[in-house]
Image (tube, rainbow, N blue to C red):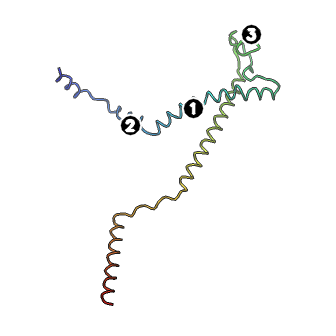
Amino acid sequence: MADLKTDLKAHVRAPSWVGEFRAFIMRGNVVDLAVGVVIGAAFTGIVNSLVKDVFNPVIGLLVGGIDFSNLFVTLKGPHETTLEAAQKAGAVTLNLGLFVNAVIQFLIVAMAIFWMVKALTRLHVREEAKPAAPPAPSPTEVLLTEIRDELVARNNAQSTTQG
């Protein structure tokens, strides 16, 4: 039985793409992208609340008390006062307010990303501006320095014995 298992393992090989896929997943860029997606999903909830609970009431107040989430046009079906009631009644609606909310959310996310990229770029430029430590001398340079020092020492020794 043990020989059969060993024999099967010898004949069953993983497809060649499995190794490539494993290497692809473990690359830093893919992991960074996954982290970005998770953070983006969490950030979306914050932005949605900011638009719905903070910006829309203020903008609505400034433009005469309009609630953007209930700004819609009924194309077919019963005319209702709220979008939720119209949708429950089966009306076909053009949801302009929800579109305005989505545009505001997009602009907030775009601005946040802009400032984040700007800050990261500034940090990256500061890192590049720092002077790097001089590179260590190569083995050839070390050898030439030792030869030079030996020649100088010999010349000094000859000068003191002759003088």
Among the 4 quarters of the image, the one containing residue 92: top right
Of the residues shown, which amino acid type is indicated by label 2? Answer: Ala
Q: Which residue corresponds to the image point at 51% horizontal and 34% vertical from the top-left? A: 35
Residue 49 as seen in the image, left or right of residue 163: right
Q: Position of residue 36 (x, y in %)?
A: 53, 35
Quadrant position of the C terminus in the picture: bottom left
**Picture disc at residue 78:** 3
Among the 4 quarters of the image, the one containing residue 6: top left
Q: Which-is-in-front pick, marks 2 and 3?
A: 2
Q: Which-is-in-front pick, marks 1 and 3?
A: 1
Q: Position of residue 134 (x, y in %)?
A: 45, 62
Tell me if mark 1 has few (under 14), some (14-19) or many (20+) residues whose alpha carbon lies within 10 angstroms of its own: few
For this orientation, the residue located farthest to the bottom is 163
Q: Position of residue 66 (x, y in %)?
A: 79, 23
Q: Position of residue 96 (x, y in %)?
A: 72, 23
Label 1 and label 3: CA atoms lie apart by 38 Å
> Is 118 in front, or is 89?
118
Quadrant position of the N terminus in the picture: top left
Q: Which residue is mark 2?
A: 23
> Is 43 in front, or is 114?
43
Tag 3, which secondary structure? loop
Label 2 and label 1: CA atoms lie apart by 25 Å
Choose the circle earlier in sequence order: 1 or 3.
Answer: 1
Q: Which-is-in-front pick, marks 2 and 1?
A: 1
Tag 2, which secondary structure? helix
Choose the circle earlier in sequence order: 2 or 3.
Answer: 2
Of the residues shown, which amino acid type is indicated by label 1? Answer: Gly
Tell me if mark 3 has few (under 14), some (14-19) or many (20+) residues whose alpha carbon lies within 10 angstroms of its own: some
